Image: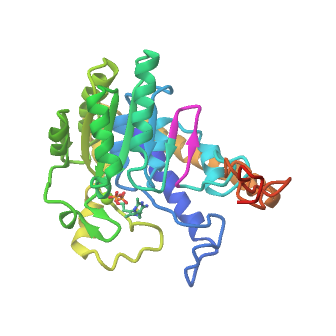
Amino acid sequence: MYEAMVTARRYEERLQEEYLEGKQPAFDISAGPIPGELHLAAGHEASGAGVCQHLRDDDTVTAPHRPHHIAVAKGVDLKRMTAEIFGRETGLSKGKGGHMHLFDPDVNFACSGIIAEGCPPAVGAGLAAKKRNTDSVAVAFLGEGAIDQGAFLESLNLAAVQDLPVVFVVEDNDWAISMPKDRVTDVENGARRADGFDMPGTRVDADDAVAVYEAAREAIGRARDRNGPSLLEVQVHRRMGHFMGDPQAYRSDEDKAAAQQRDSIDRLESDLRAHGVDDETIDELRSSARERVEEAIEWAKEQPEPEPADAHEDVFTNPPSGVTDGEPNVAKTETGGDD
Ligand SMILES: Cc1ncc(C[n+]2csc(CCOP(=O)(O)OP(=O)(O)O)c2C)c(N)n1
Ligand SMILES: [Mg+2]
């Protein structure tokens, strides 16, 4: 878990540096080696690491727009993920998805920029596992800002009524962009929503990787043993803005400072030391994480840009008129006229 957490943190520190290249002094979102938005997950690491520690490659994970800590913990190929973020041809989605649309079929990982969007596909993966009679499970991660979305509530219902091996993990960082949690729900403990669907719900009140690990063991074990779905809410902290470039004018200095003080990585490191893990081992884990991250970034930067001519490839299943290489794609009516 520690390895996954320090790798994710270091990875994002480096992405941050790369992201700012070319974008300053007047912030230009489309400039530099990483064009577009970038949502960093510093402060969320305990959730990804504590949950994914129980997962195998054949288990499915869907993640939201803040995906890197979960992708790292699930074992997504770091080089191809980085190439994707840099918009390169050898990226996971040939450079067309960017950081919010990572897709790695080798470890069954996907994420989406549409909030709560990962819930229905996770239920689908759970249904597939049940029909195939395997013991694989599906986990859908989402933010607390997405818990009023129909996609989430309908998914909870379907997973419960069909007894599917799905675990829903709500990462509660108290904010949805600039919207504080208490303005979107009167239910402070999000795990209580499970009661309405007759499934177990657990909240881990601190971003403590060991506590997450233990709660996730129960929920994932239950799913794997074919005892149905569960809901897990984990308190995490947003150490940064909603996305890179967010000045966070809506957030008090106290709140920002509090998020810096609660670091799940420091907490786990102290736990490891208290259990006899020595400095040398900790240093080795940290330096191998740094090396891995550096290698991935260097590799990604050397990768080719996609060909402009391939821009529409793999994007549309039914290409709109004018984007196919042959005849324009115009629907015909029964009488043969153009529609
Ligand atoms: C269906 C939909 N509505 C609105 C948005 C715009 N949006 C992007 S992130 C976000 C807030 C997400 O907050 P939360 O789920 O708590 O995740 P966090 O960013 O805090 O990790 C919103 C509203 C979206 N991406 N998808
Ligand atoms: Mg949130």
- The image quadrant that residue 18 belongs to is bottom right
Instruction: Check residue 121 for magenta coloring.
Output: no
Residue 324 drawn at (x, y percent) = 80, 54
In the displayed structure, does residue 310 sit left or right of residue 270? right
Residue at (67, 52) in percent of width and height:
315
* Outermost residue to the bottom: 26
Residue 156 drawn at (x, y percent) = 28, 39
Colour treatment of the image: rainbow
Instruction: Check residue 108 for magenta coloring.
Output: yes
- The secondary structure that most of the magenta stretch takes on is loop
* Outermost residue to the right: 326
Residue 102 drawn at (x, y percent) = 56, 47
221 shown above or below 172? above
- Residue 1 in view: no
In the displayed structure, does residue 199 sit left or right of residue 260? left
Residue 260 drawn at (x, y percent) = 30, 62
* Outermost residue to the top: 133
- The image quadrant that residue 141 belongs to is top left
11 shown above or below 245? above
Q: Quadrant of ligand 1?
A: bottom left
Numbered disc total: 0
Quadrant where the image shows the C terminus:
bottom right
Which residue is nearer to you in this view: 79 or 329? 329
Which residue is nearer to you in this view: 193 or 224? 193
Residue at (62, 64) in percent of width and height:
34
Highlighted range, magenta: 100-109
Residue at (19, 49) in percent of width and height:
190
In the displayed structure, does residue 44 sit left or right of residue 295? left
